[in-house]
DNA sequence: TGCCCGGTATAGCAAGGGTC
DNA sequence: GACCCTTGCTATACCGGGCA
């Protein structure tokens, strides 16, 4: 049986040139060190040192074994350093704010994976609107938040992308168009409209305003995307929603892309003004790693 | 040449852990 | 709990170089 003490002894003998000084270095008695070295040689079936003139000199095979032993002990040291460095990561809490859609779709698998990697870190997720996410980040009441279309200068971990699509009743005049042609935002805003917000300030109304347009006839304003789809099926009006919110069952609905696509991205950004905690850095690094 | 010193090897023992 | 194995300890023998 060989243990780490044998390999430490081997390297110590090579460094000091004598078994006695090697024994002192590793904290053994001379005789114990001598026995350990003999045991190592016996176990390997080769002579690692020649004992002569009050010193122990490595044989050719001994030099090769010593080199490998040094690599092994260095690797062990690396393992120790990794364990020491990660100790700070083993505990902690991340307060995270997000708007509902991301909280319901993207975050659960991400947080499951994170919990598997860092079981000691608790993630507390708050469901708020996108405006509230920014307010909580500014006030540093959360450690990180999910934001829409983050500015390039924000150090954000990308969670996902999608695009806005028009949803119309199946029998609507615009629904006769093909997917290739799509629908103009300008003609969409003229239609009776079911405005769905999903709890976000970025919605059909703000997108129209950004394009210098306005929703001409908002029949109903709802928070839940699912409510909007039901109302569109009932031919109350048309709507504009993120592609990711579309239901699997789309009977009674016609989904068309915008002729000029409006892309959307959402990302996790840390609160500014203070360095991210080790726990939050681990989460952001996990996002970067994909 | 004999003694001293430093280094190595070995016998015997105790302690600890695993197995039945 | 007895037994066995491993490990490391102490004590001691042995060896070789240095020195008077």
Image (spheres, coloured by chain):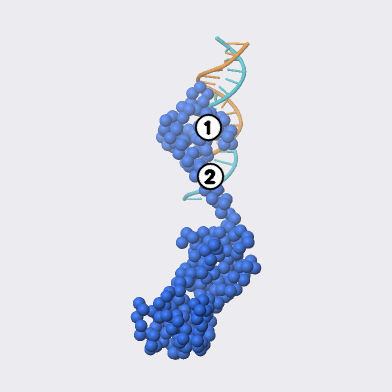
Chain colours: A blue, B cyan, C orange
**Residue at the front extreme of this rendering:** A212
- Residue topped by disc 2: A77
Instruction: Name the residue: 49% across, 65% down.
Output: A158
Q: CA distance from mark 1 to mark 2?
A: 18 Å
SS state under label 1:
helix
Given the image, what chain letter belongs to the residue carrying mark 2?
Answer: A
Give left or right: position of A122 versus C4: right
Percent position (x, y) of residue A193? 48, 86
Q: Nearer the viewer, residue A278 or A275?
A: A275
Instruction: Name the residue: 51% across, 76% down.
Output: A210
Earlier along the polypeptide chain: callout 1 or callout 2?
1
Give left or right: position of A184 versus C7: left
Q: Mark 1 packing: few (<14 Cα in 10 Å), some, or many (20+)?
A: few
Using the rendered image of the protein, determine whether residue A75 is visible from the camera's viewpoint.
yes
Instruction: Name the residue: 55% across, 51% down.
Output: A83
Q: Mark 2 packing: few (<14 Cα in 10 Å), some, or many (20+)?
A: few
Q: Residue A171's image quarter?
A: bottom left
Percent position (x, y) of residue A200? 54, 77
Using the rendered image of the protein, determine whether residue A251 is visible from the camera's viewpoint.
no
Q: Nearer the viewer, residue A167 or A41?
A: A167
Percent position (x, y) of residue A55? 51, 25
Residue A15: mark? 1
- Confirm or deny contact between disc 1 and disc 2 (CB under 8 A): no
């Amino acid at each position: 049986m060989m243990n780490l003490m044998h390999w430490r002894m081997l390297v110590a003998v090579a460094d000091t040139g004598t078994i006695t000084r090697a024994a002192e270095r590793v904290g053994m008695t001379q005789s114990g060190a001598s026995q350990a070295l003999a045991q190592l040689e016996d176990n390997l079936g080769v002579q690692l040192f020649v004992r002569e003139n009050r010193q122990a000199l490595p044989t050719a095979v001994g030099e090769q074994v010593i080199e490998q032993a040094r690599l092994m002990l260095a690797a062990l040291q690396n393992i120790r350093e990794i364990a020491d460095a990660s100790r700070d990561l083993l505990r902690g809490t991340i307060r995270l704010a997000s708007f509902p859609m991301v909280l319901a779709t993207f975050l659960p698998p991400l947080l499951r994976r994170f919990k598997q990697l860092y079981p000691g870190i608790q993630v507390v997720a708050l469901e708020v609107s996108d405006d509230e996410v920014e307010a909580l980040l500014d006030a540093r009441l959360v450690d990180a938040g999910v934001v829409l279309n983050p500015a390039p200068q924000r150090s954000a971990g990308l969670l996902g992308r999608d695009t806005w699509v028009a949803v119309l009743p199946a029998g609507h005049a615009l629904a006769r168009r093909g997917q290739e042609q799509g629908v103009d935002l300008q003609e969409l805003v003229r239609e009776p409209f079911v405005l769905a917000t999903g709890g976000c300030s970025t919605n059909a109304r703000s997108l129209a305003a950004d394009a210098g347009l306005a929703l001409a006839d908002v029949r109903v304003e709802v928070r839940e995307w699912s409510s909007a789809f039901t109302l569109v099926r009932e031919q109350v009006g048309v709507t504009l929603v993120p592609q990711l919110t579309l239901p699997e069952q789309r009977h009674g609905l016609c989904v068309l892309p915008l002729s000029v696509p409006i892309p959307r991205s959402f990302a996790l950004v840390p609160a500014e003004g203070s360095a991210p905690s080790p726990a939050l850095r681990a989460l952001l690094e996990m996002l970067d790693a994909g």
